Amino acid sequence: MKLEDVLSIVSESRNLYVWENGEIIAQYDGRDSIPEELNDRKNELVDCSNNDFHVYLIEE
C-alpha cells in the first residue's frame, strides 16, 4: 500500500504522522500537509494510537 492510499481513507480531522528511520519526516495536523513527493512511497506499517495515525515508510 502506498502513502497516497492511506491518505485517501484517513479522515482529515485526524492527525497523521509519517515516519522514516525512527524520525517523523512529515505530518498532517490540520495546518501542515504531507509533501506530494512522499505519495508513491510504500508503507511498512500503519498504526492508529489515541486517534492519531502513524505511517511507517519502507526505507529506500
Image (cartoon, grey):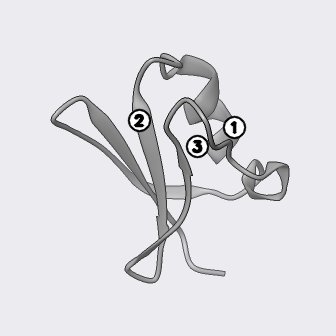
Left or right: 60 in relation to 48: right
Left or right: 3 in relation to 29: right
- For the question of whether residue 43 can be seen, the reply is yes
Above or below, 8 relative to 55: above
The residue identified by callout 3 is 1
Q: CA distance from mark 2 to mark 3?
A: 19 Å
Disc 3, SS: loop
The amino acid type, in three-letter code, at marker 1 is Glu
Above or below, 6 relative to 25: above
Asked whether 38 or 51 is in front, the reply is 51
Disc assigned to residue 4: 1
Disc assigned to residue 15: 2
Which of pointers 2 and 1 indicates the residue nearer the eye?
A: 2
Residue that protrudes farthest toward the right in the picture: 37
Q: Position of residue 35 (x, y in %)?
A: 77, 52
- For the question of whether residue 2 can be seen, the reply is no
Q: Earlier in the sequence, mark 2 or mark 3?
A: 3
Left or right: 52 in relation to 33: left
Q: Earlier in the sequence, mark 2 or mark 1?
A: 1
Q: CA distance from mark 3 to mark 1?
A: 8 Å
Instruction: Tell me the crowding category of disc 2: few under 14, some 14 to 19, or many 20 or more residues within 10 angstroms, Cα based.
Output: some
Instruction: Tell me the crowding category of disc 1: few under 14, some 14 to 19, or many 20 or more residues within 10 angstroms, Cα based.
Output: some
Q: Position of residue 43 (x, y in %)?
A: 52, 55
Q: Position of residue 50 (x, y in %)?
A: 15, 35
Q: What residue is shown at x 84% (from left), y 57% (from top)?
A: 37
Disc 2, SS: strand
